[in-house]
Structure formats: C-alpha cells, structure tokens
Amino acid sequence: MYVPFWVWALTIVGLLAVLALDLAIVGRRPHEVGVREAARWVGVYVGLAALFAVGLYLVAGQDPATAFVAGYVTEYSLSVDNLFVFLLIMSAFAVPKVHQHRVLLFGILIALVLRGAFILAGAAVIERFSWVFYLFGAFLVLTAIKVVMGSDEEEFEENALLRLVRRVLPVTDDYVGTRSVVRRRDAQGRLRLTATPMLMVMIAIGMTDLLFALDSIPAIFGLTTDPYIVFTANMFALMGLRQLYFLLGGLLDKLVYLSYGLGVILAFIGVKLVLEALHTNTLPFLNGGEPLAVPTIGIELSLGVIVGVLLVTTIASLVRVRFFPAPPTVEDGEDDPETASTGADRTPGA
C-alpha cells in the first residue's frame, strides 16, 4: 500500500497529540490510577484503534484494514506479557503508585521512538532480502518454545545502559517528585547533575519494551510487510499499554495459560512466515532458486486463529482459577496445616 509522506506526517502528529493530551492530564494531577479510570482509558485507546481501522477500510480497502486489526491484536496480546516484567521493574525501583502512570508514559515514549527506528530498518531489510523471512520464522518458533517452557519466576536485572548511567551520573536514593534529574552538592560541595530513580525506571521500561519488540515486530511482519500498517499497529498497541497495566495489574496472576496462548500465536506466525518464504523462495540452493508450491495462510485466517487462541486461553485460565484454585502454600514462619491441630501439644506447660 502506497502511503504519501503527508499521510505519514499527519499520522505521527496525531499520535503525538494524543500522547501530549495524556501527558497533560497526568502532569496536571499525579494520582494513583484506579480500575475504573484505567478501563475508561483502555476503551478510549481501543476505540481510536477501531476508528483507524474503519478509516483504513474506507480509504484503502478490506485487506489493509484486516491486516491492521490482526497486527494490532497480535501486538496488544504480546504486550500483555510485558506487563509481568513492568510489575517487576516497578517493584525493584519501589515506584510510588502516584507516579507509576507517568513512569510508564515516558518509558513507552522511549519505546515508541526505538520501535519506529526498528520497524523502518526491518522493512528495508525485508524489501531487499526476502530470505530474511526464513530467519524470522525460525526465530519465532524458537521464541514460542521458550515462552511455553520458560520459568514463571523472573528477576529484574539492570541492563548495560542503566549501569552506564550510574557510572556517568550519581543517582539519588529517593524520588524527588516527578523530576528525573536534580542538582545536588557532592562531597566537595560542588553542584552536580544527579539522576533520580525516576529516570532509571523510565529507561528500564523503555529498554525492556524494546527487547520484547525483538519477537513482536517479526511477528507482525509475518502478518503484513506494509511498514505503515506495522508502525501504526505498534503505536496504537503501545499507547494503550499503560492503562492495560493498571486494569489487569491484579488479574495477571489469573491468566495462568497466557504463556501457552502466546506461544501458539508465535509458533503459528513463525510457520506462516516460513511458508511465505518458501512460496517466494529465491535461495539458489533450495529448489534451484525457484518458488515452491506450498500453501500460504491468508490474513483473514491469521486473524481468526489469533483471536480464537486468545479467547480460548483467557476462558481456560479463568475456569482454571475459578474452579481449580491452586492449593495454599506454607509461607516461611507459618505453621504447617498438618501440625497446626497439634499446636497445644507444643505449648509450654500443656
């Protein structure tokens, strides 16, 4: 789909305007985001994405609109997995709840810029080297296996960029309102620029999301190679991610089968990519550089599989938690249930 420069510019300006409005609202009155407020904002961002899809349908036709919806749903569902790590980061940096929305906003702004560059680079590589689909497909299948087999217990570790910031700038032990940097006197009495934990956690959120993009962006390129659709689907999914964090924060532990659903989606798209690569094969050592007569998977079927897997995963998770709850675990320092009834026998003088 050919997209003129002015459409790109207008789209980016519109997305920035929405984010600026969000930032103005957050900056005007920092507060702890409740479930109702988060639900309203999720509805707003999902509604904006739906309006954009309708606009694509009216202007460009069914195929681009369907590709956008499939890409948006894929990116949004894969982003849910990010929320687990966001919770770890917020806990590791002890971010006050009144500032968590602001931290996520700026962290995701960093991710928007980095993902935009990543998408442009990926589109250029795909256009020039179609065989890269083989690599993307294999990578997604391996990632799917890792997602399904991965451990539930994760710990946040500072990356190289955060360690570099700590070497260049001193970091305060406490938060200074919403400020990212302040001027404080060092041991010699000189004023020095000093970072606060607010800056560190924003960088951590942004860089962590970029790492997640290593599998989500190849996944959406498996659905469409149109850079405009890939870009807008990513941007809409990221913009609504903050509100989803507050809406699902208390429900994430209930999505016990989420990793299996995401693994199935990644594996499915990985297979789709390999089939597309075989269908348009140019590798000289494979079938003499000629395309192979293999079936391909259409975008409508892809959308149906993605939505279906997410619905089954969510329903199965809720049923599992509701009717087959995990047995309570014995915490450190608590009495074992089997010995609790004999507690009187251990009481002095009994």
Image (spheres, rainbow, N blue to C red):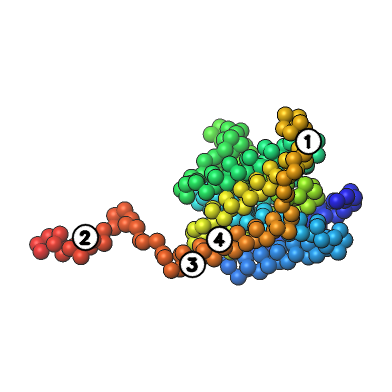
Residue at the image position 52 percent from the left and 49 percent from the top: 148
Q: CA–CA distance between discs 1 and 2?
A: 72 Å
Residue beneath disc 1: 290
Residue at the image position 86 percent from the left and 58 percent from the top: 60
Marked residue nearer the N-terminal end (4 or 2): 4
Element type at mark 3: helix
Q: Is residue 46 above or below residue 215?
A: below
Residue beneath disc 3: 319
Q: Is residue 191 visible?
A: no
Q: CA–CA distance between discs 4 and 1?
A: 39 Å
Numbered tag placed on residue 229 in the rendering: none
Residue at the image position 60 percent from the left and 59 percent from the top: 309
Asked if the residue at tag 2 contacts the one at tag 4, i.e. Cβ–Cβ closer than 8 Å, the answer is no
Residue 76 pos. (x, y %): 65, 56
Marked residue nearer the N-terminal end (1 or 2): 1
Q: Is residue 221 visible?
A: yes
Numbered tag placed on residue 339 in the rendering: 2
Marked residue nearer the N-terminal end (4 or 1): 1
